[in-house]
Amino acid sequence: MSGIFQALSYAILYGTLVLICYYGATRRNLISPGNLVQFLFLLLSVIANVVMLALNLGPLFQVYAASDRIKELIDVPTSQKGSFKP
């Protein structure tokens, strides 16, 4: 599941960059090349941090699920003394 999430995150990251480059290339009179590069660097820094945050949330949810399972195992009643028969 985390592999799919990671692939989707990177696809969104690079897809956004490609779309902005395409838009900037087709609208030359709207934005200067310097402003486009500046915007791309700022966008990349923001999106990269969001992707890293999302990738770090995966293990946190795994720990939460594992702790629930540990609680279930702890709540299992133990057998009475002498009831074990091989």
Image (tube, grey):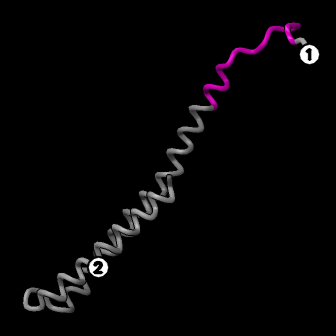
Secondary structure state at the residue bearing disc 1? loop
Which callout, 2 or 1, points to the residue nearer the camera? 1
Instruction: Verify whether residue 73 appears in magenta.
Output: yes
- Left or right: residue 51 versus residue 83 is left
- Picture residue at 37% right of the left edge, 62% below the top: 50
- Left or right: residue 50 versus residue 80 is left
Q: Position of residue 39 (x, y in %)?
A: 23, 80
Tag shown at residue 14: none
> As displayed, is residue 54 above or below residue 47?
above
Q: Position of residue 81 (x, y in %)?
A: 85, 8
- Picture residue at 23% right of the left edge, 79% below the top: 20
- Classify mark 1: residues with Cα within 10 Å, few (<14), some (14-19) or many (20+): few
Report which residue position mark 1 lands on.
Answer: 86
Secondary structure state at the residue bearing disc 2? helix
Q: Amino acid at mark 1?
A: Pro
Q: Quadrant of the C terminus?
A: top right
> As displayed, is residue 57 above or below residue 12?
above
Most distant residue in the left direction: 29
Report which residue position mark 2 lands on.
Answer: 18
Q: What span is in magenta?
A: 70-84
Quadrant in which residue 45 is drawn: bottom left
CB atoms at circles 2 and 1 under 8 Å apart? no
Label 2 vs 1, first from the N-terminus: 2
Quadrant in which residue 24 is drawn: bottom left
- Picture residue at 12% right of the left edge, 91% below the top: 28
- Picture residue at 31% right of the left edge, 73% below the top: 15
Q: Position of residue 68 (x, y in %)?
A: 56, 32
- Left or right: residue 68 versus residue 49 is right
Give the prevailing secondary structure in the magenta stretch.
Answer: loop
Q: How many marks?
A: 2
Q: Marks 2 and 1, how far apart in space?
A: 67 Å
